[in-house]
Image (cartoon, helix red, strand yellow):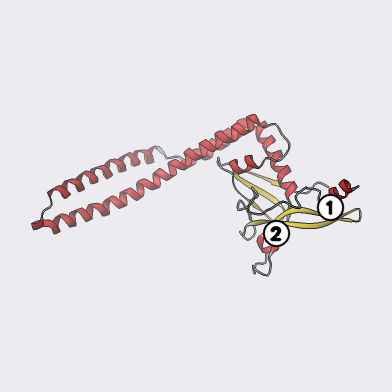
Amino acid sequence: MKRRSNMFRNPDGKYKQAYSNKSCFSNILFCEECGHPIVRRRLTSERNGEKFLYTAWQCRTRVHPKKYNVNCKAKFVWESALERDFMTLLYELKEGKEELIQEAHKVIEEYDLSSAEKARKLNLEAQIEQINERVSELAEQSNSTVASVYEASINHLYYEQELLQSEYDELSNKQQESKHMERHLETLLTFLYEFDESEFNEDIFRQVIQQGTINQDQKVTLEFKCGITRTFVALRQK
């Protein structure tokens, strides 16, 4: 009888669980309506005349309306629905791995450098190296009688170098992002290859999801670290 009572009062087994910052959903899910973070909360419902607690996620402004003066209409979603539908999504990705790979590579190519950008990056690298060599030469040739002339020349070279370096860094960061996405795709494919479970796996979620949004109709949009996005409606199964 006690076990049956606990099942009704605490059906998801999370009543004593510490959250919200420790959850894999924390600081990852945001409200699509107002942009605020989605936070974890405990709610009470009733089944067969007996009250029970359950875990849900909702826009922070709805949970703390007095603190945030925002007229957000976002509904809460059951945590169990989020977990269940994410696992279902993984099975769907596993079944359609070829389409997944094609889609991810298309996104990754958009982040990668074009042929012209790669050539420009090499050219910038050469120019920066030339400036470094010229600065070294001027520093060696400077003396007290014409120190101001050399200093002006060196300062001008430093300014030019700063502009070139900024452009070079921008291209490098863009190229690095595509490499990160490629590695994350490999991670996702490894998980899918080894994946054969129904219970929610926090580790997989943490490693493959970049961020997500939930709208007022409980539609969840997840952005994977490899660049793809997927949506589902997280409805509670009664």
Q: Position of residue 181 (x, y in %)?
A: 52, 39
Q: Earlier in the sequence, mark 2 or mark 1?
A: 1
Q: Does dot 2 land on a helix, a strand or a loop?
A: loop
Mark 1 crowdedness (10 Å alpha carbons): few <14, some 14-19, many ≥20? many
Q: Which residue is mark 1?
A: 9
Mark 2 crowdedness (10 Å alpha carbons): few <14, some 14-19, many ≥20? many
**Residue that sits furthest to the left in the current view:** 145
Which image quadrant for residue 226? top right
When the figure is inspected, residue 49 is found, relative to residue 197, above or below; the finding is below
Which image quadrant for residue 41? bottom right
Q: Which residue is mark 2?
A: 74
Question: Residue at image x 63%, y 29%?
Answer: 193
Q: At label 2, which amino acid type do we have?
A: Ala
Nearest to the eye among marks 2 and 1: give it. 1
When the figure is inspected, residue 147 is found, relative to residue 120, above or below; the finding is below
Question: Residue at image x 70%, y 41%?
Answer: 200
Are the residues at dot 2 and dot 1 in contact (C-beta closer than 8 Å)? Answer: no
* CA–CA distance in space, label 2 to label 1: 26 Å
Of residues 29 and 110, the one nearer the viewer is 29
Question: Residue at image x 68%, y 65%?
Answer: 64
> In the image, is 176 to the left or to the right of 236?
left
Q: Position of residue 40 (x, y in %)?
A: 69, 55
**Residue that sits furthest to the front in the current view:** 2
Q: Position of residue 118 (x, y in %)?
A: 37, 38
Q: At label 1, which amino acid type do we have?
A: Arg
When the figure is inspected, residue 53 is found, relative to residue 121, above or below; the finding is below
> In the image, is 78 to the left or to the right of 180?
right
Q: Does dot 1 land on a helix, a strand or a loop?
A: helix
Q: Position of residue 121 (x, y in %)?
A: 35, 41
